[in-house]
Amino acid sequence: MNIKKEIFGQCPRGEKAFLFTLVNPNGITVKITNYGAIITAIEMADKKGKKENIALGFRTLEEYLSADYLANYPYFGAVCGRYCNRIAGGKLNIDGVDYRLFINNGPNHLHGGQAGFDKMIWTPKTIDMPDFVGLELKYRSVHLEENYPGNLDVTILYKLTHKNELHIEYKAVTDRTTVVNLTNHTYFNLNGGEENILNHQLLINSKKRTVTDSNLIPTGEIADVTNTPFDFSTTKSVGADIGLLPDGYDLNYPLGNADKKMVFAGKLSEEETGRSVSVFTNEPGLQIYTGYYIPSLGERFGRYSGFALETQHYPDSPNHPEFPSTELKPGDVYKSKTTYLFETTK
Ligand code: BGC
C-alpha cells in the first residue's frame, strides 16, 4: 500500500490544493484532492488486465475551476454538503427560526448552495495502515455559512483497503441544531469513458422510490416500482427503459434501513470490461443520477457519460417530518458510511 502527495494547483483565494494518490496491493488507484474532497480518478483493471479510470474527473485543478465546467456544474467526484440534494424553495425552519438558503436549482436549493463543501479546502492528513491507506479531511463550516445555523466540524475518512473497497466515513458535530446530509458525487463509467453508461447493468436493493414533483422535490408519496421503468430490483441495463423518461434517471430509492445498519444498496456492472462497483451504506436512501445534464467539454463527457450512485437521506427531508431526520443537535455525532467495492469478473 502506498500514498503519494503532490501539488494539484492554487485556488483563487491563494490556498494550495494537493492531490493524494492512494494505491492498494492489487493496483487499484484512487486519487483525491483536498479541494472539495473530490475523488478525481479511480483506476482499476478490466478482465484483460487493462487499467483505466472509471470515475469522471480532471487531471488539473484549473479544469475544476474553469467557467465552462462551473456553468453547468455536475459536481464530479465531490463531497456535497452541508445538505446534499434539494431543499424546496431553500426554506429551512429549525427550532421555529427560518433560514433562507441559496437558490441554485430552479426554485430550489441544491448541494449546499453557492459555495458548498465541494468548493472548500479541507485540511488533509494521510494514514498508512497494514490493511488500508487513508486520507482524512477536516473542514469547519462556520455558523451561517450559506445561511445554515451552527458551527459544524466535519471529518471525512477515505480508506482504500487491500480487499478493493473504498470506505468513506463521515462524522460531524455542531454547536447549534442544524441539518446535515453528506454524499460523494462520483460518476462511474466502468468502460473508462469509451462509451456512455447506457449499456451498464444496474441492480438496486429497493422496490420503492420517493415520488417527486417536476422540480424533483418529494411529494411525500413513497411508491412501489414494480412494473415501472424505475424497477432495478433484478439486474437490468441502464438504457433498457430510459427512453420512457424525458431526462433519464434522477431519483431516490429508500433502502429500508431505519436502524442505520450497513446494507447493500446496489451494484453497477459492465459486461465487456467485467468491472463492477457495489455500494453499501448506513444511509436510508440511494439517489441515482444518469447524468442527463453533464456538459460536453471539448471531446469529453456529455449526456449519460457517467452514473452517480449517491448514498444519502431523502431529498428535502427538513420539510418532510415523516422522512428519516437530517437534524443534528449539539452533543450528537453525525455518522455516515459508504463502501464502494470494486470487482472484475474473469
Ligand atoms: C441530482 C441531480 C443534479 C446532479 C448535479 C444529483 O445529485 O440528483 O438532479 O443534476 O446532482 O447537480
Image: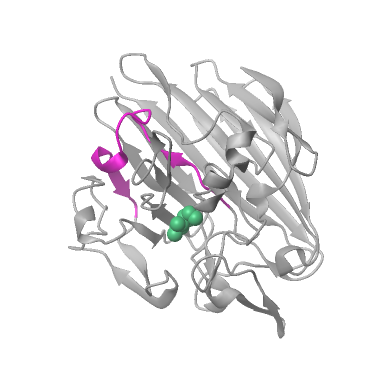
Q: Is residue 37 left or right of residue 271?
A: right
Residue drawn 43% across the image and 35% down it: 298
- In this view, the residue farthest toward the bottom is 96
Q: Quadrant of the N terminus?
A: top right
Residue drawn 67% across the image and 76% down it: 100
Q: Quadrant of the C terminus?
A: top left
Q: Is residue 199 magenta?
A: yes
Which image quarter: residue 235? Answer: top left
The percent coordinates of residue 214 (x first, y second) are 37, 73
Query: Would residue 201 be visible to someone looking at this image?
Result: no
The percent coordinates of residue 324 (x first, y second) are 53, 69
Vertical order, 158 against 153 (above or below): above
The percent coordinates of residue 281 (x first, y second) are 50, 49
How many dots with numbers?
A: 0
Q: Nearer the viewer, residue 21 or 205?
A: 21
Residue drawn 72% across the image and 40% down it: 137
Q: Nearer the viewer, residue 278 or 188?
A: 188
Q: Is residue 275 magenta?
A: no
Which image quarter: residue 97? Answer: bottom right
Stretch of the chain drawn in magenta:
183-205
Residue drawn 67% across the image and 48% down it: 119
Q: Nearer the viewer, residue 146 or 201?
A: 146
Q: Nearer the viewer, residue 40 or 168?
A: 40
